[in-house]
Image: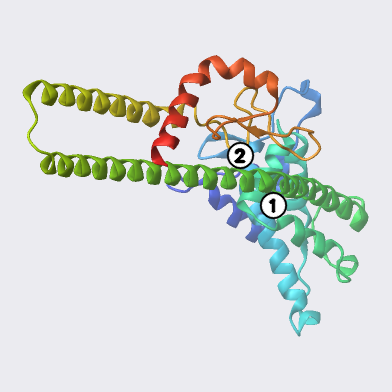
Amino acid sequence: MNNLTFPDNQRTAELAHVVATSPAACQALMAQLRIDENIGGGLADVVLVSGSVMPGDALLPAAAVALQKAVRMVRAQYDAPDNASRMAPWPANLTRAVDTAFNHTSNPEAAAATMLDVAPGLAWELEQLLASEEWPDMPVFDSDALGGHARIERVAQCVCGRLRDEEQRRQQQRRWQQPQQEQQQQQQQQQQQQQQQQQQQQQQQQQQQERQELQQRRQQEQQPPQSMPQQQQQQQQQQQQQQRDEQLQQLLHVLPATALQGPAGACAGCGATEAAGSGVRLRLCRGCRRVRYCGEECMRRQWRGHRAACKAAQAAAQKAE
């Protein structure tokens, strides 16, 4: 059996089942993964599937599933009460096939990651098997087991080491990503709180304006009729005041997204934050009390663009009082 061929209606994933259950398939898989060193090193590791060529990178996922199945099968049989009557052999051909594919893949790190994606926990399971008391006495199914049990253990340790390195890299990445995710969640919560506060302020301002308009109408109803020039002058003053209020409301509606709001806990000038050990201490603007600066220099530099927003915020605060 030189090649592994499947009908067109079967998928490459079925290679895992064939390799895990057929000793002949293990031997053929190992033969297909060997490189003929006499051909200048230009020949890649391949397996024939449905008449097409399958590289070693594509073979590793199926081989990983088969290897995990073999590890679990061996452990289950050795943990059984009657394990002495059925000694499960270790498929050394399959282990060497995975090791050979690792050695000739274009990206060993990506190959290890792919194996752990399709076979989670394979690194830990293989490591536990190699450290077990039964491993030194485990029979090996391999008609070409040159070097004996010691060589087979070295190959298995090499595969286990590659998978363990990838597992450690993932754990470090998770530990590094966790603080960032927590920081992002805090920033999102702060932004939501600010948006809620802005909505509440807008609602309060709108309610206050409605109360003022109602109070003005009641006062006008209670006042005696005035002469025509006085009424016109009063109407003009009211219109001017209403225009100023509308302009102020429009300005305050735009400012929270531009001048009155910066990144949470950051300087509005340079973006510096109060991190531990940074020595940065933010202070609120003395006018609007909404924007933070890390020092007088940033405050003076941003004052020209912030002045209109600051004055408008002060006017709104005085009016609210």
Amino acid under disc 1: Cys
Residue 160: image location, x then y, percent: 80, 52
Residue 184: image location, x then y, percent: 59, 43
Q: Is residue 45 left or right of residue 235?
A: right
- The part of the image, by quadrant, that contains residue 273 is top right
Residue 261: image location, x then y, percent: 51, 31
Q: Residue at x 34, y 41 (%)?
A: 205
Q: Residues within 10 Å of mark 1 (few under 14, many from 20)?
A: many
> In the rendered view, would you say 243 is above or below 29?
above
Point out which mark residue 26 bears.
1
> In the rendered view, would you say 162 is above or below 37?
below
Point out which mark residue 225 bears.
none
Amino acid under disc 2: Ala
Q: Residues within 10 Å of mark 2 (few under 14, many from 20)?
A: some
**Residue depth check, mark 2 versus mark 1: number of the one nearer the observer:** 2
Asked if one can make out residue 126 in the rendered structure from this viewpoint, the answer is: yes
- The part of the image, by quadrant, that contains residue 81 is bottom right
Residue 42: image location, x then y, percent: 73, 22
Q: Is residue 27 left or right of residue 185?
A: right
Q: Secondary structure at mark 2?
A: helix
Q: Residue at x 73, y 34 (%)?
A: 281
Asked if one can make out residue 1 in the rendered structure from this viewpoint, the answer is: no
Tags 2 and 1 in contact by the CB under 8 Å rule? no
Q: Is residue 262 left or right of residue 109?
A: left
**Lower sequence index among marks 2 and 1:** 1
Q: Residue at x 47, y 48 (%)?
A: 10
Residue corresponding to mark 2? 58
**Distance CA(mark 2)–CA(mark 1):** 17 Å
